[in-house]
Amino acid sequence: MRNLVLGCSLLVGLSASAAAPAESYVLKAARLFDAKAGRLVSPGVVVVTGGKVAAVGAGAKAPEGARVVELGDATLLPGFMDAHTHLTGEAGDDWRQDLIDSFQHTIPEQTLEALPRARVTLMAGFTTVRNLGAEDFIDVGLRNAIRRGLAVGPRIITATAGLGSTGGHCDAGNSWRKGLLADETGAGVADGPEALRAKVRESVKYGADLIKVCATGGVLSMNADVDSPQLTQAELDAIVDEAHARKRKVAAHAHGAEGAKRAIRAGVDSIEHGSFLDDEALDLMKRKGTWFVPTCMAFQGVKERADKGQLPEDNIRKVRAVEEARRQALRKALARGVRIAFGTDAGVFAHGRNAGEFALLVEAGLSPVEALRAATVNTAELLGVSATLGTLEPGKVADVVAVPGDPLQDIRKTEAVFFVMKEGVIHRHDAGATPTVAR
């Protein structure tokens, strides 16, 4: 089940744009990161034709008339990937105001508010993201609009509403008195194996590329312990069975060990967060090949808000409870060789800060090479898009970013992306030089 492909709509989306770019480019820099081999190559040269990588390396031939883009003392890398985002939301400085706004902003307003978040994510070098939960199918509309060239943003692989139990972390109406909200429960909420199986079918019907499920409580929900299991083994088995039958992968929000183990046994493709993963859970993940998306930036962002008093007291207590536990869980995962993919939970902190995850992964014990591979080849494999994305190789989609200097010497160079190409189209080029033309 590790190699399940995504649905036809996603595969079309990987190669489809409003119009194929007509121009050819030769991108030149001091070095290039070979994500497949995990090493730097000098000089860095990528030839792009028709939105795809045509050639790589010093011996690559430049097509006549190609625009030569000299990027200087920089490193070319595959477009970064973030396996855990929430483009349809972003935390503000006042959680009470955020709550009021969520009631008062119409669906069209919420959609328009997502546009700058998508744009800033792309400009930070993230050309592909997985959006794990959104209401009113705003994520589906955003994905489709970007594909059609109506909006600027990363390629989106989206889950629509997260699935969960009544009163659980994925229940948007949790902790609210009956009658206070127009919707008493979240759109993905159901109880019992067959009811949740039906929710999977409904999500796929309305455009989901994958399924997101809440297997445990969460830090930012209001009504449950962060580590409490919230779905039975039978419920998780039904969700995963139905999703995989429909060629959709499953991402499981899971902080607590027991809920995570149920999800792993059911066959989920990734565990998100994993704050309290114990030895048994980590051994299961290693044996089954389950991906771990540790979302270090989520904890960093939430801690920053907690330190400023920008969260309710109950949530602040949860933040303190997971702070050291999640560090230990990640260190144990790395020691066991559990597969790590790059995801941030952007939205609980400001979009565009996604690259901060690199330094936190290195701080946790990954080498800079491993951190860069986590955001490229590893996440491409998790997302099921390795055939077209994740490395700079001939025939693959031309998603290319550039950072100043050498990110293997200073991983924080990833936070200074100054050039972004997606599908052969340049979306960002901070350098003032005008490209020359190859003859």
Image (cartoon, rainbow, N blue to C red):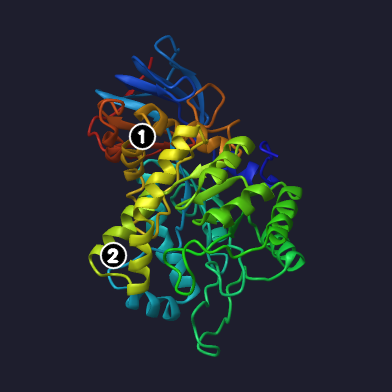
Q: Which residue is mark 2?
A: 306
Task: Using the image, tell me which numbered label, if any, was put on residue 365.
Answer: 1
Question: Where is residue 311 shown, x and y percent of the image?
Answer: 32, 70
* Residue depicted at x 77% and y 65%: 194
Residues at marks 1 and 2, CA–CA distance in whole angstroms: 25 Å
**In terms of depth relative to the viewer, which is nearer, 234 or 106?**
234
**In terms of depth relative to the viewer, which is nearer, 231 or 177?**
231
Question: Where is residue 140 shown, x and y percent of the image?
Answer: 57, 59
- Is 322 drawn above or below residue 51 in the view shown? below
Q: Secondary structure at mark 1?
A: loop
Q: Secondary structure at mark 2?
A: helix
**In terms of depth relative to the viewer, which is nearer, 67 or 261?**
261
* Residue depicted at x 74% and y 68%: 195
* Residue depicted at x 38% and y 27%: 369
Q: Quadrant of residue 24?
A: top left
The amino acid pointed to by label 2 is Ala
Q: Residues within 10 Å of mark 1 (few under 14, many from 20)?
A: some
Which callout, 1 or 2, points at the residue further toward the start of the chain?
A: 2
* Residue depicted at x 40% and y 65%: 113
Q: Can you say which quadrant of the picture contains the C terminus?
A: top left
Q: Is residue 173 left or right of residue 222?
A: right
The amino acid pointed to by label 1 is Gly
State if disc 2 and disc 1 touch (CB < 8 Å): no
- Is 313 drawn above or below residue 341 in the view shown? below
Task: Using the image, tell me which numbered label, if any, was put on residue 150.
Answer: none
Q: Quadrant of residue 291?
A: top right
Asked if residue 81 shows in the view, the reply is yes
Q: Is residue 331 left or right of residue 182?
A: left
